[in-house]
Image: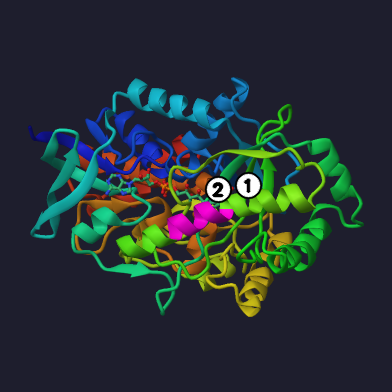
Amino acid sequence: MNYECDVLVVGGGMSGISAAVSAAKKGLRVMLAEQLSLLGGMGTAGLITMIMTSRYHFYGFGRRFMEKLCRKGDARKIEKPAIAGYDYYPFDAEAMKRALDDVLIQSSVTLLLGTKLVGAHCENHRVTSATLFGPAGAFEVRARVLIDASGDAVLCEASGEEILYGDESGNIQAPTMLAYYAGIDFDRYNAFLATFEDGKRAAKINMIHTLIPLAVREGVVSEADLHHPGIFRINEHESIGVMNAGHVYGADVSTAEGFTEATVRGRRMAKEYLDFYRRYVPGFENAYMTNTGSVLALREGKRVVGRYTMCFDEKAEYKKFTDAVMRMDGGAVSDLHASSSDKKAYEAYRALFADREKVRADDFATLPYRSLLAKKNDNLLVCGRCASADRKVMGQIRIMGYCFMMGEAVGLAAAIACRKGCDPSKIDVGVLQQELLNNQIPTL
Ligand SMILES: Cc1cc2nc3c(=O)[nH]c(=O)nc-3n(C[C@H](O)[C@H](O)[C@H](O)COP(=O)(O)OP(=O)(O)OC[C@H]3O[C@@H](n4cnc5c(N)ncnc54)[C@H](O)[C@@H]3O)c2cc1C
């Protein structure tokens, strides 16, 4: 059986969901294909169960959705986050999965889980159909507008768009296999942190420079994680936390072999870091691992070269594009994790990230609409982690708060295009900006 719809969204992470809901709310027939059997992408399958947002720029569908989740008690907002300029929304992963199912179904999006994009057909600078593979085998979907929200630019790649992977040498930011640890005595752990003069940060430095090297020498951990974001408590009343440790340095996830090797290594490291915490960190003596992520969490994969590639200097200089569709933190700050365990690479990361302290509340940079438009195909849009921006910009806007906002921008752009009977590359961006404003997303 083949399908027809107005908008096909590939990928059910936060960017794809936001795109699908935003287009469907405008009365379009929207289909969303997700290869896994759950929605939320890295946020749920990858166990990244805390939405990070810019403290100053988080608007629209994503914000309303998270506030609703907070009101229901399925997420909370951390008012005084450790890192300057960010707000955190830790959430209950199971509640999030159900809430995402509900929001799509209530918006009348045709949701196809367990359905993978495997190909695309293009003619005259347009994607004419996409080939999906689901439980009943392969089938075709014809859509007026297609949105690549796959995190990995799979639809763009299948449509012949130019794709980039990692840095000039093909090195990507190290991925991590996240894990849930339970049985943590957070009172004891917090008392341990309080023994350090500078609290959490000094404790982390001690961990990275003293305890982890010791654990490597003692054979508890096979690879030192210089970065080591560490444990994050999900629910303040429970003994459970999500562990973000074990950067898989040198990973290459662009081939099946490399992806498999990195996933296996990440899973092994999740257990090693449990052993590490149990042995060296007060409060973890009785901790145990309940589960690792269903997928390896990728900080970086493939991204598309769109009509415009926003670069770091433009962000650093607080650039305001005339076709802006999203505000973001400006300044020379980026969360670009190191690819290797080389100390110099880690210091470079620290230097870039340390600028977060200087994130300004009174100014912002913007993302141009052209960064969400594919170059070769007029009816192809892209959002989330695979949009068209350089690595350092993407290092910043890949957090889920921005993914929601990029998704909303392309969902509304698709709706305008369908309404006008033109391709998204031909819409009046002023109309899109007004619609974003109506949805409380300031653009300029
Ligand atoms: C270790 C780590 C820690 C992080 N920490 C945070 C944090 O604390 N807070 C935060 O906000 N962000 C964090 N991030 C970043 C953030 O989680 C991701 O960048 C973001 O979730 C990406 O969203 P997305 O919608 O672009 O892509 P994804 O979440 O990757 O979603 C893409 C979806 O597309 C599907 N898909 C892929 N290929 C196909 C195909 N061929 N057919 C059908 N479906 C397909 C995938 O299964 C997936 O569900 C972190 C990332 C990592 C790796």
Q: Which mark is residue 243?
A: 1
Q: Nearer the viewer, residue 189 or 380?
A: 189
Direction from residue 218 to residue 136 in the image, left or right: left
Residue type highlighted by circle 1:
Met
Q: Quadrant of residue 253?
A: bottom left
- Quadrant in which the N terminus is drawn: top left
Distance from Cα at disc 1 to Cα at disc 2: 6 Å
Which residue lies at the image location 16% right of the left edge and 41% below the top edge?
143
Q: Nearer the viewer, residue 90 or 279?
A: 279
Q: Position of residue 101 (x, y in %)?
A: 39, 26
Cβ(mark 2) to ligand 1 < 8 Å? Answer: yes
Residue type highlighted by circle 2:
Leu
Question: What is the crowding at mark 2: few (fewer than 14 residues within 10 Å), some, or many (at least 20)?
Answer: many
Q: Which mark is residue 178?
A: 2
Task: Identify the image's colour scheme: rainbow, by chain, secondary structure or one colour.
Answer: rainbow
Q: Nearer the viewer, residue 149 or 199?
A: 199
Viewer can see residue 231 = yes
